Amino acid sequence: MGYHLAKALLKSEHEVFIIERSSLKSETIREELGSLVIVGDGCEEAVLKEAGTSRADVFIAATGADEDNLVACQIAKHRFQVPRTISIINNPNNEKLFVELGIDVCVSSTDIILSHIEEELPAHSLIHFMAIRGSNREVVGIRIPPDAAVVGRVLGDVPIPEDSLISFILKKDGTLMVPDSEAVLGSGDEVVAITTADGEEALREALTGAA
């Protein structure tokens, strides 16, 4: 993941430097991308110093071990004053801890994969897109099935839960609609909303419940 991320960032003309624990992988990176890699443990302060971490605008930890990602980001942030830290999270249960300990951006690989899987399941009406950092709210997508009671009704007549906000509606034909109370809901439309974990089931029922 880190290798392909580095290639994408270089293509976008960002300056990138990689810390890789494996000498074999480091040699492969050096052969393909040039001398922008150092062999070492990204959890060690001396290695981060050698890599020039104090010059970085962003520090990204993308290992397969959450504990290593957390430690590396904290050292980068507190010892080298990197303004922004980003960490991959392999276990979604760790996200709350990462946020509490000050990691600026947490990317759950499990949630990303799950959202893509959910999107391909026609029977799955609710898709989790992202959590809104610093709050208990999340962005979800709800696909309206053909037998839903809301099909053909205007949005103003739908009992949307108080803790939910409809952001936009992606119509079945691909048209993007900024909703108002007179927006008519149709079969196959996808409603993108901001809601809470507690309110998502009520929102799903309001938009997908059978007539």
Image (cartoon, grey):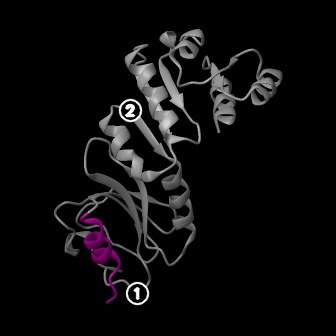
Secondary element under disc 2, as helix, strand or loop, is: loop
- For the residue carrying disc 1, how many other residues have a C-alpha within 10 Å: few (<14), some (14-19), or many (20+)? few
Task: Looking at the picture, tell me which residue is in the foreground, 171 or 40.
Answer: 40
Gap between marks 2 and 1, in whole Å?
43 Å
Magenta-colored stretch includes residue 199 = yes
Residue at 58% across / 37% down in the picture?
63
* The N terminus - image quarter: top right
Q: Position of residue 99 (x, y in %)?
A: 34, 39
Q: Position of residue 24 (x, y in %)?
A: 79, 29
Q: Position of residue 200 (x, y in %)?
A: 29, 66
Residue at 57% across / 36% down in the picture?
62
Task: Identify residue for label 2.
Answer: 103
Label placed on residue 147: 1
Question: Magenta region: which residues?
Answer: 198-211
Question: Quarter-wise, where is residue 182 in the image?
Answer: bottom left
Task: Tell me which secondary structure the magenta stretch mostly adopts.
Answer: helix
Q: Amino acid at mark 2?
A: Ile
Secondary element under disc 1, as helix, strand or loop, is: loop
Label placed on residue 137: none
Earlier in the chain: of badge 2 and badge 1, it is: 2
